[in-house]
Structure formats: C-alpha cells, structure tokens
Amino acid sequence: MSSLLVDNIGELVTNGAGEGPLGIRRNAAVLVEEGRVVWVGPSAYAPAADRRLDAGGAAVLPGFVDSHAHLVFAGDRAAEFAARMAGQPYTGGGIRTTVGATRAATDNELRATVRRLRGEALRQGTTTMEIKSGYGLTVADEARSLRIAAESSTETTFLGAHVVPAEYADRPDDYVSLVCGPMLAAATPYAKWVDVFCERGAFDVDHARAILACGQAAGLGVRIHANQLGPGAGVRLGVELDAASVDHCTHLSDADVDALAGTARSDGSGTRTVATLLPGAEFSTRSPYPDARRLLDAGVTVALATDCNPGSSYTSSMPFCVALAVREMRMTPAEAVWAATAGGARALRRDDIGVLTPGARADLVVLDAPSYLHLAYRPGVPLIRQVMRNGVTP
Ligand SMILES: [Zn+2]
C-alpha cells in the first residue's frame, strides 16, 4: 500500500475541525492512502510515507465540487452572446439552437466536447463535476447524452425536460408523457438525478412536478432549475419533493426562503435542500445576481456552481464563480469557498468530497498562493498549481 504525504501546507482548508467556518489549519500536512485522506495534522508531526509532496507553504483546499453543468452539446452560441451584450434580453429560447446542433453531432464529437470541458475544469481545480443531458430531447439523444456523460462523471442528471422541443411546441402534454415514459426508461441506466427547467417558456410547475415524481419513482434523486428568470413555485416544489438542490434562486419570495430554511437538519449543519447559485449565468446574461446574503442569513445551505453551458454561462471556472460571489453577491471569501467545495458536495448529497478530513476522498488543490483569499482577491489569475483526484495527479 503506497502512501503519500502532502506537507508544508501553509494554510489548509479542511471544511472540518479547525479555525473558522473553513476549518483552517496552519503549517499542516495530509496523509493519503489508497485515494483517501487518512490523517490530517501539524506538518512537524506528520507520519512517514512512501512519497512526499512539498506544498512549499502554499494553501491547499478540497477540490471544487461543481454540482451544475451542461457539457453534452455541440456548437456554440457566441453570436447570441454578442447580441445580448448589445442589448437583447435572455429568454432561454436559444437552447433549441443547441438542440439542433447536438442531434446532428456524432457520439465522438459530443464525447470530445465533454472531455475537453471536463479537462478544462479539472485544470481549474474541479475534482467533481455533475453533468446533465438536455440538448438531445429525443429518447435516443437523451440516452446517448447520458451514456457519454457517465464516461466522465458518476454525477449524471437526466434533463429531458430542459425545454419543449420544437416538434412538440403545440402539444407539451405529449412531450411530458414522452419524458416520463420511454425517455426516462432509456435514461435511468445512466443517470443518478432527474432535473427540470421550471420556468416560464420551459415547464410549468404541474409538468415539473409530474416529471420529477416519475424520476423519483424510478430511483433518481431530484434537483430543479427554479426561479431564474422570474418568480414562481419551482423552489417550493423542490422543497416539497426533498430535492437535493434548487438551482439558480435568483427571484425568491419570503415564502421561498422560509421553505428552504424549513429543511434545516436536526444536527444544525445546514439545510437538506441546498440553494445552488450560478453567478456565471447572471454575469453572461447581464442580469441581477441572486441575493446570497438573504439565504445565508436565513440559515439556508448555499452552493456555488458554474452552470457551464454554451448559451447562458460558458465558463468552467469555479474560481471565477467564487470571485463573482464575493464581489457581486456579498458572500465573504470563506462563505464562497465553502459553497464551492462542501456546499457543492451537499448539493450532491455527498459527504466524502468537499472536505479534507480522515475518510474523505483525497481530492485537493494546491494553490499558487498563500491563502484561499487569493481566489477572490486575484480574479482571473490561474492560481491552481496542482490538482489531485483520488490521491493521484490526473
Ligand atoms: Zn442549468
């Protein structure tokens, strides 16, 4: 059994026991065996190991957990972005453009895009990345999207209810029946989660409830895109169905915040339904950001994710989202880093990632910086010196 000691860590973010909300330890070391953290403590007292990685006094933190990404697609929508920056509003209608390109692509073209974006995210410190379908919208295209997604992640999400495809535009009930029937059946072998884009112009709350309930009955966990473009009942539906996460949360009523806060865990460690904020989407659509402070002050567990997709947020960078959350959403750097690591893990109902404590997966990043603060303090700078996943450098 080969062991690895990462030592001489100036500032270690554990998200466990330690100083402050990030469980910080100074002059620390982490011992890794068989892909797991087995010991965390002062560098000076570190046990012997077969190999050693000297962090050189830099900061080390858990790998980022990006719990919301749409990587299986073809084409890009740079022209739509340019038009939006010239004043056109975002409506979500451009999703159909990507659906056409995705259906026309070969498996290998889709696979190459997923691998390129997954690799890009990994180099920026993302060690876990959820991947959704949702640009196929036929039984065969949704199944192959998930089959390809499952090659790169165990966190795969069936989003057949992304939009109603053009061929069903005047009969959405029939499309919902297709999603709940043969499409779900074809998707389930490759999916862990079911998701719906619950929004005006996509799926209303009754359709969303029907689809999520079918997915749940098939053994999938629930997540939902809700309250992105305007107010609505999506967040409360997510809470009603014990969703792991409600995502976007840009337009919330007091009742929505109360519903999320009402899912508090009995041990006081936050809420069961996480609010996942996706500031890359507001950045890329020039829209008002969600009110993170209101959620945090109400005791809601907040996660940050990229929403990486070719239309409304074509970034794979969690450090960018951390910087946006701090500058634009009034999260403290500690809150943002927690949300991008442990928060993302909660949004995926995982306790083996997003933390660096004994028993956790050895997924970590070494920064080219003395402190996690630099992730927000030095935006746009490549600060990820080294990434380790399952105890090995990918
Ligand atoms: Zn999304």
Image (cartoon, helix red, strand yellow):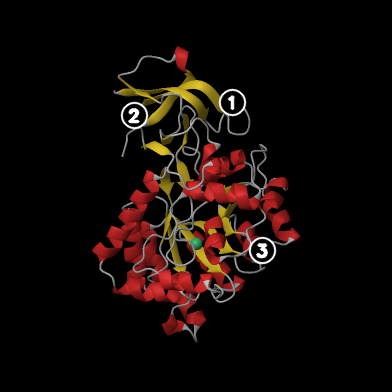
- Residue that numbered label 3 is attached to: 251
C-alpha separation, residue under disc 3 versus residue under disc 1: 35 Å
Using residue 136 as the reference point, say whether residue 222 is left or right of it. right
Q: Position of residue 57 (x, y in %)?
A: 45, 24
Judging by the rendered image, the residue that carries numbered circle 2 is 34
Is residue 56 in sight in this rendering?
A: yes
Q: Which residue is mark 1?
A: 18
Mark 2 secondary-structure assignment = loop
Q: Amino acid at mark 2?
A: Glu
Question: Which residue is at a point 64% across and 46% down the rendered structure image?
Answer: 331
Front of the two marks 2 and 1? 1
The percent position of residue 327, horizontal first and vertical second, equals 61, 49
How many marks are shown on the rendered structure? 3
Residue found 40% across the figure and 70% down from its top: 183
Q: Quadrant of the C terminus?
A: top left
The foreground one among 225 and 307 is 307
**Real-space Cα separation, disc 3 to disc 2, in angstroms:** 44 Å
Of all residues shown, which one is farthest toward the top? 45
Frontmost of labels 3 and 2 is 3
Identify the amino acid type marked 3. Answer: His
Task: Depth check: give the residue in front, 171 or 314.
Answer: 314
Disc 1 element: loop
